[in-house]
Image (cartoon, rainbow, N blue to C red):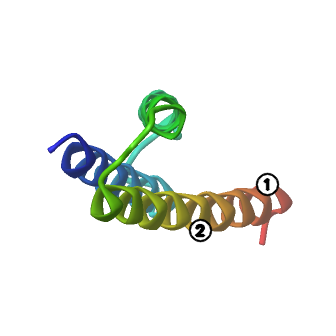
Amino acid sequence: EKLDSLEVKITRLKQEYEQYFMRLLKREPLIRKKEVESLILRYTNMTINNTADQFKLNCLLSRFNSYRQYWTRILRSMEDGV
């Protein structure tokens, strides 16, 4: 259930970034991003014996890293005025 809450937080963060890129939000959702990053750090430092939970965590990490690379690329293009 902890990984499910992490998944929900990642999805919500993705939605907030989409709203920010569409200029519906005035500020980048940095607080939520830090919250998700701290949760990820906590879970990666834990020992997970359940293989299914470890797989789910790895999938969530991959998804979050992909999103983060995408957000960085979009932010850079916004700063460049493209």
Q: Secondary structure at mark 1?
A: helix
Residue 70 position by quadrant:
bottom right
Residue position for label 2: 66
> At label 2, which amino acid type do we have?
Ser
* Distance CA(mark 1)–CA(mark 2): 20 Å
Q: Residue at x 40, y 56 (%)?
A: 57
Label 2, residues with CA under 10 Å away: few <14, some 14-19, many ≥20: few
Secondary structure at badge 2 equals: helix
Residue 72: x and y, percent? 71, 57
> Which is nearer the eye, 42 or 67?
42
Q: Residue at x 77, y 72 (%)?
A: 82
Query: Is the C-beta separation of discs 1 and 2 under 8 Å?
Result: no
Furthest residue to the bottom? 82
Dot label at residue 79: 1
Q: Which mark is residue 54?
A: none
Q: Residue 23's x, y, as percent?
A: 46, 55
Q: Quadrant of residue 68?
A: bottom right
First along the sequence among labels 1 and 2: 2
Residue 9 at x, y = what percent? 30, 45
Rendered residue at 47%/29% (across/down): 42
Q: Above or below — where is 15 with respect to 35?
A: below
Q: Please tell me whether mark 1 or mark 2 is closer to you in this view.
A: 2
- The number of numbered discs placed on residues in the rendered structure image is 2
- State left or right for residue 19 relative to residue 37: left
Q: Amino acid at mark 1?
A: Glu
Which residue does the image show at 21% across and 44% down from the upper left? 5
Towards the viewer: 46 or 75: 46
